Amino acid sequence: MSWIAALIVALAVSADDAPKPIETENASARLLGRPCAAFQFLAGAAVYNPVQEKELFALTSSSEDQPMSLIFLNRKEQKASAAQAPSGTGAWALTQLPNPNLLAVGTHQDGKVMVFDMEKWAFTASAQFPGESYIWDFAPGKDGRYYFGTYAGGKLGAFDPAGLAADPPVLTIEDCGAPLPPNMYLRLVSPLPDGRILCSFGMQQPGVRIFDPATKQFSEPPASMAGISAGVVWSNYFLAADKVFNAALEPVLPPPFPVPPADKGAWRVAGEVTTADTLFLRQGNALWRLDKDKAELALVFDFDLRGGRLMAASRDGGVYGVRGNLYFYIEPGAAKLERKSLKVMPPARPPLFLVADNTRSLWGGPPFGQTLFMMNRDTGIEMNTDIVVDSGGQVYGMVFIGEVGYGVSYSNGDIFKIDPNAPWYQYDGKNPSVIASLGARGYIRPVAGVRLGPGNKLYSGWMAKYGVYGGAVAVTDPASGATELIENPFGKQTVSGLALDDAYIYVGTSLEANGLTVKTGEPPQFGVLGIEARQPLLNQPFEGATTVDRFAANIPAQRVAFAVDGALRVFNVETMKVMPPFDAAPPRVTSSAIASVGDAFVYYGSDRQVIQLNPVTGESTVLVELPRAVGAFTGAFGGDLFAACGVDVYRITKKQRP
């Protein structure tokens, strides 16, 4: 049996229940369904309530189209439940407060601290950090407050849980400042043994500072802590990687605890599961535990998690973690990783991309989570996969050779192969399988997606790693995985747009970068490379713009349509020139892609409208207006168009004129 048959999770809506199509003079739009459904777990904690004598594994789950949820797992009873937050699309920060009934989460997109009361089973308090959109991490300070970092201001914030005992609860955030501008991130905050806070800033000019809650001042760490950006407190020591510091932040050698066997390689502190009383050490695939008042290490497990993330330690001596949509609990002495599903429905999520394969299916994936969905374009029957690669991130696009799909993903720069007709063995690296990875070569985010070129080679467009301006076009042999990089073909800018024909590679660039502000002092480019020589043939800068992207090659018309900060422009392949703007400016491009299906037009979304554009004359026609703004967008060659409006996916069929 193929994995498609094994993973189908929803059936088509019956004809009686299906919404009526949207009919216009030019097209008909039918709702196919909400095919993208997957968890994206960001933070986790083992929370113990001494009154109830119950341990729960708590997880934050993102959902871009609706508020985030807290998922709670009772491992011993094999029960799971969810509580949806009033706002916030996800949360990287999660901690249990001194009142064991209370959990604090720090959200992203709206930059809030919210408090969940497990006794009342409700969110009971929230406060927003003005001007900040992300809250990262929590660390307790010696003043009883909890500290956290932010994005995009790179600030340190704090709140006092004492106010939560009031009726109604009071939650107030204090802005503790941003000592290292122009850094946008304060992603890591760590408690020190004396109750001060270690803060690690990035990405523009990375640096570390120590905040003292008593004086409310930042200072540089001592020279002994050079290179240390984060750590954990255990038994009044500060531990980071394989280094140990006492309360005065002086190095301690040898470590004041037993260490794993030297002949088995280097070790490091497993900060993600270490608690104040229980120390965990990682050595290769092995995890060791040192219990309080014990003199010897105990081996918890020794096997590859294959991208699984440890998230919390249990009072029973084991550890919790997640891998994709699945969770795991590893008992001490376990011989293999046993992954299990949570008996909670995953949230519907808006697709990041859509692409039609060579059969009758539509594929896509969520903005985060490395999962895919596959939907029958006629019936709306859908299925969702688990993760397709081990690294965290998301899939940016796919192409197909026959029925076999090839995709590109962030954050390890993976290029993968997936065969829907073969058994699913992703954990074993067989199907889906990674055929090439560009992360070690400096490229991690395939913002221009992937295209199929002559000789069935895969062409993809990339943004450089964090803290670096630059981009590349990658050319990959799908059989061997051998990948050639065309780096910075038009300057050190992200490759943000990509299209090709038999002779040329058409490239768009962007001034945006991972973890950096928009590059200044130069414009983004439209450029052309020879597909054989890989050499630039021409380029045109766009002064005052930021990004040239969303390319679609219309081969019959000999035109390439693209967007410059959302304004539609066209390149004439016959004259090898970018055409002047049309006299009547077409509607702006707001969808994630422009589609070409082999006829005389190109198609795209402009807010809620689906636009048909003649790339030769510039004449545009509104095919249909949908209920919400169009996000992900694609077309099937010689066939229909497909648009995602939030979580809803529509099929748009043009009407034949008499």
Image (cartoon, helix red, strand yellow):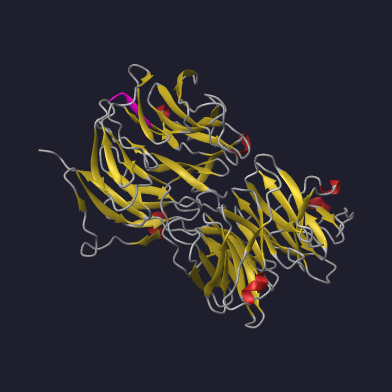
Closer to the camera in the image, 490 or 332? 490
Picture quarter with the N terminus:
bottom left
Closer to the camera in the image, 27 or 429? 27
Residue, far left: 658
Q: Residue at x 40, y 30 (%)?
A: 499
How many circles with numbers are drawn on the protein?
A: 0
Picture quarter with the C terminus:
top left
Up-down relation of residue 324 to residue 98 (above or below): above
Tell me if residue 271 is in the magenta stretch: no
Residue, far right: 253
Q: Position of residue 231 (x, y in %)?
A: 75, 55
Q: Residue at x 49, y 70 (%)?
A: 82
Tell me if residue 558 is in the magenta stretch: yes
Q: Position of residue 535 (x, y in %)?
A: 50, 19
Report the side of 174 relative to 297 (left or right): left
Magenta stretch, residue numbers: 557-562
Q: Residue at x 80, y 52 (%)?
A: 242
Q: Position of residue 631 (x, y in %)?
A: 38, 47
Principal secondary structure, stretch drawn in magenta: strand
Up-down relation of residue 459 to residue 268 (above or below): above
The quarter of the picture where residue 482 lies is: top right
The quarter of the picture where residue 272 lies is: bottom right
Q: Residue at x 73, y 44 (%)?
A: 207
Q: Is residue 357 visible?
A: no
Report the side of 342 relative to 241 (left or right): left
Closer to the camera in the image, 333 or 55? 55
